[in-house]
Amino acid sequence: MRCKKHVFMGDKDGVHCFKCGFTMTHDEYVKSLRKEDKDEELREHDSVSDDLVSESENTSL
Ligand SMILES: [Zn+2]
């Protein structure tokens, strides 16, 4: 059983979610953090390309 949003606490073996008890090693935890970072980068990228699109639309006017 896993909760929707884990609340991780560090312990000697890695981290564990204190809500549902889900555990990860430090390596897995770092990887999951990096993955979230990437997702945010992608989202930022999307908004940047949106800006570029509206800019080129303005130029064509
Ligand atoms: Zn959890």
Image: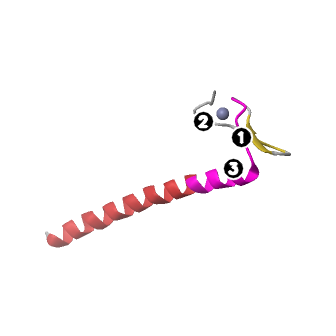
Q: Residues within 10 Å of mark 1 (few under 14, many from 20)?
A: some
Looking at the rendering, which quadrant does residue 34 occupy? bottom right
Return the residue at label 1.
Answer: 8
The quadrant of the image that shows the N terminus is top right
Return the residue at label 2.
Answer: 5
Q: Nearer the viewer, residue 52 or 61?
A: 52
Distance CA(mark 1)–CA(mark 3)? 9 Å
Which amino acid, by three-letter code, is at mark 3? Tyr
Residue sitting farthest toward the top? 1
Residue 29 counted in the magenta span: yes
Query: Of tags 2 and 3, which is closer to the observer?
Result: 3
> Which element is circle 2 on?
loop
> Which element is circle 1 on?
strand
Up the image or down, 43 lies above or below 52; here it is above
Whether the residue carrying mark 1 lies under 8 Å from ligand 1 is answered with yes
Q: Residue at x 26, y 65 (%)?
A: 53
Whether the residue carrying mark 2 lies under 8 Å from ligand 1 is answered with yes
Q: Residue at x 50, y 54 (%)?
A: 39
Q: Residues within 10 Å of mark 3 (few under 14, many from 20)?
A: some
Distance CA(mark 2)–CA(mark 1)? 9 Å
Residue sitting farthest toward the left? 61
Mark nearer the N terminus (2 vs 3): 2
Q: How is the image coloured?
A: secondary structure
Q: Residues within 10 Å of mark 2 (few under 14, many from 20)?
A: few
Query: Of tags 1 and 3, which is closer to the observer?
Result: 3
Q: Residue at x 65, y 37 (%)?
A: 6
The answer to whether the residues at label 1 and label 3 have Cβ atoms under 8 Å apart is yes
- Which span of residues is magenta-colored? 20-35
Q: In this view, does 31 lie to the left or right of 51?
A: right
Residue 29 marker: 3
Whether the residue carrying mark 3 lies under 8 Å from ligand 1 is answered with no
